[in-house]
Image (spheres, coloured by chain):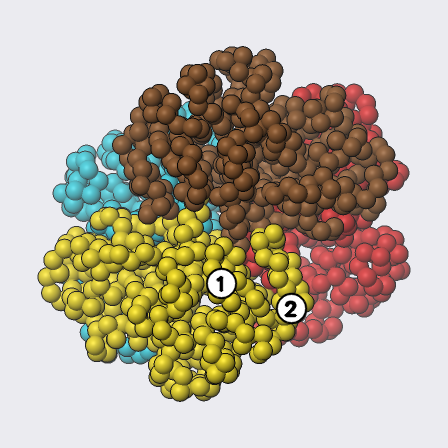
Chain colours: A cyan, B red, C brown, D yellow
């Protein structure tokens, strides 16, 4: 049994992590910390866990965390980087679900997150936890930077095209739509049901923090700088991201469907749907899955890729479990076999 | 491995049954029939099952069903009763998720379902599949009548009071609210998103088919006739039933909280919440669970019981699996350990 | 033109009042105060008002309010009572959309609202603004206590039965369901889309502040004390209240449908629907309307009344405009002719 | 008073047209036809109209329609073109809310709508009813082709850029999201609440009927052929379209904000929002309004335009009333002053 610690865990990413850990046969939750909720039973905050998880939030305690094999950070950005060095010294491996270790360049991090990075020396060794790109490096990583939700959906959709050099990487467009849970479980007017339901809007068009993360991933695949326009939108639903991706072909691509199927052959959590498909976000609700379809409307020069995930699962907690499985030599899909809830 | 057949299976109860069967370690789906969809891969209709269930709908075939250990009927009312006698003769056990075997009196059945019953001789042996009442009889039953969704929520809420003779059974009120999936997966204007979302209404106030079913169950518990007003409502959400139950105390009841906790002590799928609780339907979304709270507002004579289930799980497919587990001597909760999806 | 002031106005009741005032031909908004938003254009907070209302929030200013003919308070409970005496001295008439003047007994007010009443002398003259009961007194009132949302729906549904002495007033039950806008526009976790959508729950079962208000109104109609169990629920939608009311007949009631139709004959904003109807909340979305249906299931002793309103219109801002129209001798329906938005 | 006839009217476009006609001071609904619902009171089908519209559906009757000043067709595609010639001969003017007269080239019409056009001679005189482009021609038109919902939102967003020749018209992208009411009020599985809520998907990526309509409008503005990728999506809400438009600058555009403001200066129903805005669809719910914002993310070469409408109002019935007002010399905004419902 892997001894697991969770820092944070009162947000949506946290409760989803707990749901998945509760059903994981080889993981044992030893400690979950929350400064504000110390002493409270986790199942009192999240009644879906009643009968499944008999544990209380505790005040942060370095010793308790140091006794774990792995610690997940489900904390606000800028928190994990304060504690990770000490955990590593104690021999604990870390999976950060926030953004602290996602960007390789600390200057870019500071620009987009508004604070200097606290442990730039660790950035170099941290592995970006997208198994479909970095599987082997994840196995041995001490620190895994779990990807953002939008970056997961967008990169998985663009990678087959970019890796093969088929599209103009200067004019990529990612029009992405997210359910409201992406905004987290914090009191705010903008995500009240009465504000966010029965409405649709774009946000952060001038610049969203996931832009540099996506760009970094695509540039690693391309081998050079890319130009990306990224427009996120808020959709009136709880879970799900739908990325609609546009790229201009620069060469005759051959069979795009086959290209995608080959790229993801053997991937347990990327499902290339049949030609002509339109994946629905609900088909992955609660499941660690990315479903992708590729189109070439009217046979023109623009490729359209549709990529859907559950932002809380393949876009956060599920991918974190997938990374844990890899890091500890377990079957990659252990504890992740749940079927999406539909309807 | 239990060899399982499913008749029907293109509706919401059906796909939920398939989701649960896909995760059940001791059940193997051998055949799923659908006259209209014969030949179609199940996962083409329900893409959440892609990668989990590699089976096609087939035309109804008595021999294929006769080779199963158990056959679930997820069909419209009046269908199962046409085929069950033959299956029983073949030694197959049956779990009917429709209403065909729920009412013991064929005259009542004919009144509410508008057709004569096709196999009244089997009615007598059919066991009403509410494990919290009939667990032992279910173990040996050849035919289990899986309870309706409203009846499950309402009976589990009223039973502790009625079994102890604490309330006036002539004036019971069940005000129940259901998500739209209770209306099934059929093309109809009334359950379009544009008709049923952002609105709330009662329906079938003059009389709903679940009224005689609930009354029958309560009368068996009371030992005499009961008077029940049952008002169902349509709530703008997909899954979930919330029953708000009102009963007049006729005797000093003592500690109601303790009464409920004792009644359901040891029940794996009934959770009596702490005193003062207000259970949310989402706390059981996707889970085979009934959560109950009991209140006595202002210390008056009216007891208010709040009872929530997922209509597709404890109210249908999950309870059916629970019954199958009992019938075949397996652990009652096998394949039913999934945590509710929240948020 | 009536010179109108609004105190508060940054909440849902406020923006709905502004929407209706913007379309009222005889009302002119002179001042809208908000301590926190002073200086901000109202249309910057509520973009639906762009092009319709060119006014800014201003800091509270007694002189500006004193120059109005009528001042609406769309403020938290306990605010209006601080300012009303001064406004009355200045000859301004007041419509309070909060609870400050709804309860006649200051001791009851203090019990349920947790603070002593600041101007108990005005309580006696304040008129409860339910035009279907108090139309004539409203015309000349200086202070109108605009009814609560639940109390409007519940009283209008029960009144015909109670006024005629047909039911047992000791065992009344009001099972009420509200959209989330009833909880107001304030940052809170419980009313986030991710918490309140796709779920249903009861709340405040031990006691809700609208209970004494409803009871007071029913007791005035009955002429004696009544026993009422009131259970409010949160429904996953923005607008709408559906009250399902249960009462035991104590006498042969005759034609209930005719009774209700006669009671509300000539009422511009109460619509008794045809026998057998099930009113939907969406049929009154955005409209100052209460639609009612009365049932007697299976011809038994229990009468079921279904009563729907838009909580922000007939349950708040629309009723306030209706009261203003009465107070200033205008046609009662002036500015209130908008058709409900459906779908 | 303008004598108005409506053909069709049992769908969402129809009921919205009735809502707006009920509040129009100079229009009088004389006849509304529906073969299937003849004899039924309109308010029995649409209870929001109870008390506002006392009229019954009647069987189609050419004489009754011929006695009208204007007839609206709210019918399926291919219906209006069967009757329009006869109405024109009778001197009746026509506003078709379907697609019959939107495409100038009958061959294109046949390609996308799958049937030959029945009155190609009228196509030449029919005026495309986008007042922001064709205001003067609409005034005198005998037949107005009311634009589609997507085409309204997309064209209004692109026009300022294309008319000024600032962008590469070969690589335009319109990523559009619609509420479910765009799919109409017909029984179908795909738009059930349980299928379409809590999910998001693209559809018709290979080709949607609104593509040629949009392209035709943009080509007229550009003066040459354009290349457009149009991807529509289904959003889990009732009303609203959000078009996110992408275009590559080919010249230094100067002040884009000023460009848009000047283009729509004086337009009563196009609102260019302040720089940096993100319009929400709810800000136009129920209102005949298009709100637009223009962005140039990171100062790059890609312009992003956000354009929102209510698909049933500015995208259908409201624009039809706007056209009627123009055709009959009334104030363009008569009967269209309603404020959007928010929340």
Chain letter, disc 2 residue: D
Query: A38 or B268: which is nearer to us?
Result: A38
Dot 1 surroundings within 10 Å: few (below 14), some, or many (20 or more)? few
- Which x, y percent locates residue B52? 51, 61
Query: B133 or D248: which is nearer to us?
Result: D248
Which residue sits at x=56%, y=66%? Answer: D30
Dot 2 surroundings within 10 Å: few (below 14), some, or many (20 or more)? some
Horizontal arrangement in the rendering, residue B26 relative to residue B156 (left or right): left
Above or below for B162 versus A227: above
Query: A236 or C152: which is nearer to us?
Result: C152
> In the picture, which quadrant includes the N terminus of chain A?
top left
Which residue sits at x=21%, y=77%? Answer: D223
- Which x, y percent locates residue C119? 50, 13
Q: Is residue D89 visible?
A: yes
Which of the numbered marks, if any, corresponds to residue D37? 2
Is tag 1's residue or tag 2's residue first in the polypeptide sequence?
Answer: 1
Horizontal arrangement in the rendering, residue B264 relative to residue D195 (left or right): right
Label 2 sits on a secondary structure element that is loop
Which residue sits at x=51%, y=23%? Answer: C142
> In the picture, which quadrant includes the C terminus of chain A?
bottom right
Which residue sits at x=34%, y=42%? Answer: C53
Horizontal arrangement in the rendering, residue A155 relative to residue D67 (left or right): left
Q: Marks 1 and 2: which is nearer the front?
A: 1
Q: Alpha-carbon distance for marks 1 and 2?
A: 27 Å
Query: D297 or C20: which is nearer to us?
Result: C20
Q: To which quarter of the image does residue C161 belong?
A: top right
Above or below for B187 versus C260: below
Residues behind callouts 1 and 2 on a single chain: yes
Which of the numbered marks, if any, corresponds to residue D1? 1
Which of the numbered marks, if any, corresponds to residue A77? none
Q: Is residue D194 visible?
A: no
């Amino acid at each position: 049994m892997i001894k697991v610690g969770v820092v944070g865990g009162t947000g949506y990413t946290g409760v989803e992590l707990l749901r998945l850990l509760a059903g994981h046969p080889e993981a044992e939750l030893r400690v979950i910390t929350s400064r504000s909720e110390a002493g409270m039973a986790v199942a009192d905050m999240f009644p879906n866990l009643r009968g499944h998880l008999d544990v209380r939030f505790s005040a942060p305690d370095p010793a308790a965390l140091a006794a774990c094999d792995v610690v997940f950070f489900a904390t606000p950005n800028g928190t994990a980087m304060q504690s990770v060095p000490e955990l590593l010294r104690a021999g604990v491996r870390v999976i950060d679900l926030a953004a602290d270790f996602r960007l390789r360049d600390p200057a870019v991090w500071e620009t987009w997150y508004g604070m200097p990075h606290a442990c730039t020396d660790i950035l170099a060794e941290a592995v970006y936890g997208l198994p479909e790109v970095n599987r082997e490096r994840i196995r041995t990583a001490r620190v895994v930077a779990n990807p953002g939700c939008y970056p997961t959906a967008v990169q998985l959709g663009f990678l087959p095209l970019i890796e093969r050099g088929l599209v103009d990487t200067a004019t990529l467009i990612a029009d992405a739509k997210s359910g409201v849970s992406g905004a987290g479980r914090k009191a705010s007017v903008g995500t009240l049901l009465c504000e966010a339901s029965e409405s649709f809007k774009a946000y952060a068009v001038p610049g969203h923090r996931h832009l540099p993360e996506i760009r970094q991933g695509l540039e690693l695949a391309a081998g050079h700088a890319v130009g990306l326009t990224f427009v996120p939108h808020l959709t009136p639903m709880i879970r799900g991201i739908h990325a609609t991706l546009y790229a201009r072909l620069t060469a005759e691509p051959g069979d795009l469907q086959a290209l995608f199927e080959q790229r993801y052959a053997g991937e347990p959590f990327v499902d290339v749907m049949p030609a002509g498909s339109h994946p629905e976000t609900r088909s992955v609700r609660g499941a660690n899955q990315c479903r992708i379809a590729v189109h070439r409307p009217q046979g023109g020069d623009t490729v359209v890729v549709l990529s859907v995930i559950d932002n809380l699962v393949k876009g956060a907690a599920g991918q974190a479990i997938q990374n844990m499985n890899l890091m500890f030599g377990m079957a990659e899909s252990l504890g992740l076999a749940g079927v999406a809830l539909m309807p």
